[in-house]
Amino acid sequence: MRLAPSGCHMHGSRPTLQNLDPDVLRGLSPSVLQGVGRTSGCRGRRVARQGTVPGAARGSRHILDLVGKVRTRQSVPGQRPGEPHQWLALVHIEIESPDKATPLRPRMFDAYVQLRRKHGLPVLPIGVYLGLDGIGIDVYEEHFWELRPVRFEYLYVGLPALDAIEFVQGDNWLGVALAALMKIPKDRVAWLGAEALRRIQAAPLSDQQRFLLGECVQAYLPLDETQQREFERLVASEPYRGVQAMNTTWYEKGIEQGITKGIEQGMEKGQREALRKVLEARFSPLSAGTLKKLAQLPMDRLLALLEKALTADSLRDLGLEA
């Protein structure tokens, strides 16, 4: 039995990095990141807010796992005529599961083009594979018969090639969690899972970050029945006794926050739709400008405007005239 349901927080089937610092990935491949300094700003971001990254379906949107702005230790030459040398760059990191390895390649290319166009900075793209072995360079190509108009290269780190014991004992907290996907001696799988959770419990992170990392350990740790029994024995003993209570608390807190957020979003959507219907009934047709203002109204104004809309003489009285 797992300590808690193993539904690791993911986009699709990959762990989310939106609340983690990209510097935690430095230890996964120090050789490829030795030329960049620490991040000066980072966040997981929805690409559509900057301009849609093309997907397989028209109008689809892809979420980038993480984009961090970093200072470089040596200048990066301008990539185009007249473009100056840069001491700032973007590091774009995508983490993907084995069954999504092929789709990741065109997405890496699409994201690179979008980030370059939007920010005008050099971009270092890195793919983190959960099933592909090794550390190296992966390639995406497009062909028009014998012509090859696109050849795009990006760095990749294949977690199964890395030493799980080394990472679970290190101070790279993402590395501690992802050790569950690395190379683990068969006789140490149960210990590694318990040790990873113990270290995450004591890590200087927020509750949300510890919850996400703990969930990923449990989602990916490869336990057979015998190893599962050993894992349960370990977490019930010292020094792992606090792991079970800790994980249950994080899980329940996450569920509670999710339910609360869902209720609030449902209420907001219902109030906004009700207001739109009243406005259409009284002042139809509504202009595009009015609909835009309606969509931008904060939740705390919706109910008051809904009551006022029943007796208002015009959209101007409601502050919604385009």
Image (cartoon, rainbow, N blue to C red):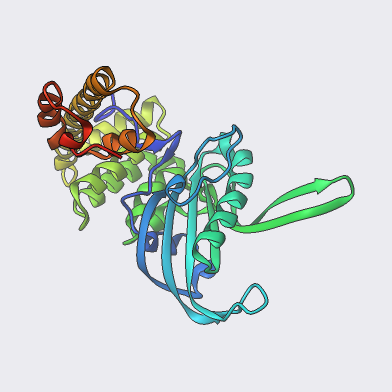
> In the rendered image, is residue 202 in sight?
yes
Q: Quadrant of residue 316?
A: top left
Farthest residue, direction front: 313
Which residue sits at x=33%, y=28%?
286
Farthest residue, direction top: 281
Classify 120 as above or below 313.
Answer: below
Between 106 and 17, the residue placed more toward the observer is: 106
Between 235 and 286, the residue placed more toward the observer is: 286
Which residue sits at x=54%, y=64%?
123
Q: Give coordinates of residue 243: x percent, y percent.
A: 19, 40
Q: Quadrant of residue 99?
A: top right
Classify 113 as above or below 264.
Answer: below
Which residue sits at x=19%, y=39%?
319
Q: Quadrant of the C terminus?
A: top left
Classify 289 as above or below 153.
Answer: above
Classify 86 as above or below 198.
Answer: below
Which residue sits at x=22%, y=55%?
205
